[in-house]
């Protein structure tokens, strides 16, 4: 049974989540769901995976609400916002009850088949009450995995997938993933045409994080530079490459790491992307993931170069990135600014703060008069959010277009240099009814780069990202 065949009750809004009839179990089950990482679903059956650590973040809020309702049944329950992977904050109102309809859950409850869901990733560290959760570095993530004995020799990855007990409990989806792994192990591209598109997508995106690596190890992936890669690793094959799937996903460009030498700490960052179709590229990693690489190359930073631009963006709050980025372009490359923006640039601090204040005050304060035209057609279509949110969105999109039109000299080359030989991109795609794999390496030579934003006029939480595609 597919998710959308049993989604028959109303959405998981505050009244449903904190329904007095189910207060003894539903809020606790909700928190348990966040801890386990199983997906929420909408009325169309689309799946939304919570970010690691959301259980720890939201448990105090949910507990406080339950206690307040126990004392006062008229207490107004809050709208719970969950951080969803690749989507940012989303209200539970967008989700169906699904496995939270009754205490025993749905018999068809979806299983998280990402590395964290099937138990091959390290567990994220629990948040400490009153303290901001620390960003985990690559070295820390690797050491945590080694300490927990979660490293997997690449030559044994197939056995780990084949004997995984969580996939055994995942019904038809788990069986499909194991069958795909079996076909890869036999040296062929797996057939997935027998599954519906939703299942194909889940296999390519979620299970693709380990199936793509397996395809690379078993020579099923298209990897034109594999011999050069082995020479770079000083290895005859990939069997002894230690694979690590981090539980923390808040700091890295990579979905997994390959450690070739524990003594030297030589690490390959592996980014796994996928989907249905030849052009599927998956989610874009945050530009902030390049911060440590920028720090190592500070000596090459010059006003107006690509390194300077990335450094400026990483030092700027998300809501201000569009403004600061356009100011940067106007200063160093004024002829690259579109005509409709030239009369309003450069943006002053007062312009920016007044716009942000409009967002904070839910549109009850004015935005700068010179920005009003950018909240209307032909610049913006009517939508949700405030006038200030529309301006922030418009300016950010303008910056993205300028960069992707190649108007900032050296941006692509800079990103690829920052990724260098210790970064590889693995694509897992459904093409012609089969899973097809491709490996891009080295980062500093291969790949096209584009700036990307998931910002919307109603959601200011999504910082600038980038994509590397073939």
Image (cartoon, grey):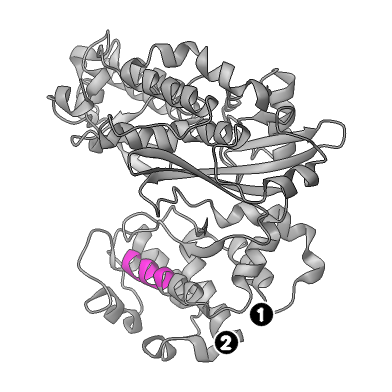
Question: 72 or 343: nearer the eye?
Answer: 343
Q: Position of residue 128 (x, y in %)?
A: 60, 27
- Residue lying furthest top: 104
Q: Residues within 10 Å of mark 2 (few under 14, many from 20)?
A: some
Q: Which quadrant holds residue 443?
A: bottom right
Q: Which quadrant holds residue 62?
A: top left
Residue under the point 50% across and 60% down = 464
- Residue lying furthest front: 187
User: In the shown orientation, is residue 341 left or right of residue 76?
Assistant: right
Quickly name the residue at label 2: 333
Q: What secondary structure do most residues of the magenta stretch adopt?
A: helix
Residue under the point 40% across and 55% down = 279
Magenta stretch: residue 280 in it?
A: no
Quickly name the residue at label 1: 304
Q: Quadrant of the N terminus?
A: top left
Q: Which residues are magenta?
A: 389-397
């Amino acid at each position: 049974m597919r998710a959308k065949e049993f989604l028959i009750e109303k959405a998981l809004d505050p009244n449903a989540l904190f329904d007095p009839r189910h207060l003894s179990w539903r809020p606790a089950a909700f928190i348990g769901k966040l801890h386990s990482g199983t997906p929420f679903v909408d009325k169309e059956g689309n799946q939304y995976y919570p970010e690691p650590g959301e259980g720890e973040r939201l448990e105090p809020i949910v507990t406080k609400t339950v206690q307040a309702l126990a004392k006062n049944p008229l207490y107004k329950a809050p709208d719970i916002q969950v951080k969803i992977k690749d989507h940012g904050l989303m209200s539970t109102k967008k989700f169906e009850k699904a496995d939270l309809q009754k205490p025993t859950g749905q018999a068809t409850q979806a299983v998280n088949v990402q590395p964290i869901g099937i138990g091959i990733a390290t567990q994220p560290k629990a948040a400490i009450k009153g303290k901001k959760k620390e960003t985990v570095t690559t070295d820390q993530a690797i050491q945590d995995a080694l300490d927990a004995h979660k490293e997997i020799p690449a030559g044994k990855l197939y056995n780990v997938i084949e004997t995984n007990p969580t996939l055994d409990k995942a019904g038809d989806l788990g069986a499909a993933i194991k069958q795909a792994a079996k076909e890869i192990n036999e040296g062929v591209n797996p057939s997935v045409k027998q599954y519906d598109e939703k299942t194909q997508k889940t296999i390519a995106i979620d299970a693709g994080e380990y199936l793509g690596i397996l395809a690379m190890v078993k020579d099923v992936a298209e990897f034109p530079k594999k011999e050069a890669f082995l020479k770079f690793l000083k290895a005859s094959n990939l069997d002894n490459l230690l694979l690590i799937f981090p539980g923390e996903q808040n700091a890295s460009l990579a979905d997994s790491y390959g450690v070739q030498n524990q003594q030297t700490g030589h690490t390959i960052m592996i980014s796994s992307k996928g989907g249905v179709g030849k052009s599927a590229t998956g989610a874009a990693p945050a530009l902030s993931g390049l911060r440590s690489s920028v720090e190592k190359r500070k000596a090459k930073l010059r006003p107006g170069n690509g390194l300077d631009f990335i450094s400026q963006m990483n030092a700027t709050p998300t809501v201000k990135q569009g403004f600061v980025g356009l100011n940067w372009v106007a200063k160093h490359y004024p002829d690259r600014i579109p005509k409709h923006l030239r009369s309003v640039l450069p943006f002053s601090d007062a312009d920016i703060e007044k716009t942000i204040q409009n967002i904070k005050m839910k549109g009850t304060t004015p935005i700068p008069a010179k920005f009003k035209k950018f909240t209307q057609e032909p610049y913006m279509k009517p939508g949700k959010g405030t006038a200030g949110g529309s301006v922030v969105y418009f300016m950010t999109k303008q910056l993205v277009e300028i960069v992707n039109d190649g108007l900032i000299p050296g941006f692509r080359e800079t990103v690829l240099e920052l990724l260098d030989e210790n970064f590889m991109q693995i694509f897992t795609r459904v093409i012609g009814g089969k899973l097809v794999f491709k490996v891009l390496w080295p980062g500093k030579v291969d790949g096209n780069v584009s700036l990307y934003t998931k910002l919307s006029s109603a959601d200011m939480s999504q910082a600038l990202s980038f994509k590397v595609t073939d």
